[in-house]
Amino acid sequence: MLPYATAAGPLSIQPTSVARPVDADDVSTLLRWASQRGEPVVPRGAGTGMPGGNVGRGIALDLGACFRRMEPLDVFGRTVRVQPGVLAGDVDRAARLAGLFLPPLPSSADRCTIGGMVANNAAGARTFKYGAIRDWVQALDVVTADGSQYRLERGETVPPEFATLHTELEAELGNEPAGWPNVRKNSSGYALDRFLPEADAVQLVVGSEGTIAVVTSVTLMLAPVPQAQAVALIALRSLLDLPTLVQWAHDNSASACEFFGRRFLEVASLAHHVGAAGAVEGAEAALLLELDGDPDSVSAGADSLRRLARELGLHAIIGMEESDRRNLWSVRHAASPLIAESARSGLVSTQIIEDSVVPPEALGAYLSGVDEILHSADTDAVIFGHAGDANIHVNPLLDVGRSSWRERARALLKETVDLVADLGGTLSGEHGDGRLRAPFMEQIWGPKLAACFERTKNTLDPAGVLNPGVIIPCPHQDPLEGLWPQYSGAA
């Protein structure tokens, strides 16, 4: 059972047992049994999730072992129905053979499952233009906590328990919940802003991290592959140039707008296979922009970006051919392995902060605030992410050989939570709350919305067996429970 105790993130918790269902009826039987006995069930796919939503005590429900069927594409309707264990990259490759693609593909596409993407409302670099996975889910087959099976479709009548919840929450919040964060993307809490206007149960389940239902199939919408693309890598002398470039990306409908901090660039330059790294050596930061569309508009956009870079006195590399674009993108795609391989000796990248998101106008304040927090703690970090969405990945590099490293991790997390709350953001733009962020829900969302999240959980999972401690915290839950246990004996 050891593989089920760990995932891509820093938390490790041993399950009591493992279940590998072969179909939805198996899942239904298991959940009905678990609800009757109060036995926790922790759904998981490939284990690529970061904040601990796929580990926990109880039954590890492996949906990646058998749920791996992909039905033939509906090319005319631009949809495909897949089971949750299908890898995201496999869906995209099949779609591209038909001239289509899956826009919200994350950088972990060859490792993560579609079920995991739906659970976390996952996103990727092109979310800047195309939106997260929730914008591409047409229908879901789900099993609720009592074992009931439903097919949820956009615009269709919702099951009774979802209808009851909608009535209660609408009376409390109306159709548009006040106080919702003004962010471009969000994978924190329950998506009441999407559920309430039209009682859309699909939108409520997406991003719910296996806490209110288990997904057994997903019908995805696909988009036509763009006729042309261009990718630009721009070295920044200071962060003062960042707002101008991000605004240009918004105004010109860029498909991606990615940010690399100084430490990320230093790490990337150590990798000889990333040929574009030398172009930004010594820069304070860099921005990677992608344009897509018809050839004329992409060419005009590239010319416009060249002019802007010259006006700002910045060095820019723009790739129009596929090989050049791939080389520039390799800087971003190498992020996780570079961090793992190239951190200085004795330091470990701890994803305790990771993917907070703030209102776009607060991006500069967030980056400055994080820099101050890290400087005060005498801690380095690798920082990169989605500048256009103000969704930034922060990976502190902690010396696990020091006895105080856990206390330092806890302080960094707390201070960053305070910063995000002050700026009106959330703790996750694409990875979910998991166990790591659940204890901070009320601080981030406020007591009223946090109480509505709890009502959502209690209404749809009254026995509390679906992934307890994820999104909704258990009493006295420690956000760092299970943090890197292999370093617990550090001197």
Image (cartoon, rainbow, N blue to C red):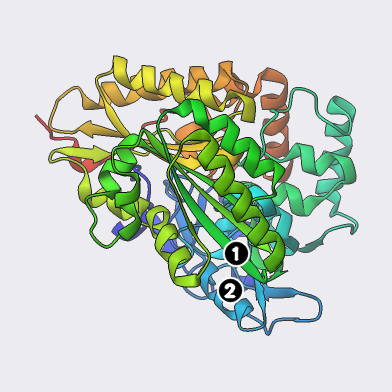
Residue at 81%, 29% in the rendered image: 177
- Give whichever of 367, 457 is nearer the camera: 367
Look at the numbered disc 1 and give the secondary structure of its residue. strand
Residue 149 in the image: above or below residue 426 = below
The residue at which mark 2 appears reads as 91
Q: Is residue 169 visible?
A: yes
Earlier sequence position, callout 1 versus callout 2: 2
Question: Horizontal placement of 288 versus 336: left or right?
Answer: right
User: Which quarter of the figure is the N terminus placed in?
Assistant: bottom left
Give the answer, above or below, for where 428 lies relative to 224.
Answer: above
Please state which amino acid type lies under the numbered disc 2: Val
Hey, which quadrant is residue 174 in on the image? Answer: top right
The residue indicated by pointer 1 is 229
Crowding at mark 2 (Cα within 10 Å: few <14, some 14-19, many 20+): many
Q: Nearer the viewer, mark 1 or mark 2?
A: 1
Local crowd size for mark 1, using a 10 Å CA cut-off: few (<14), some (14–19), many (≥20): many
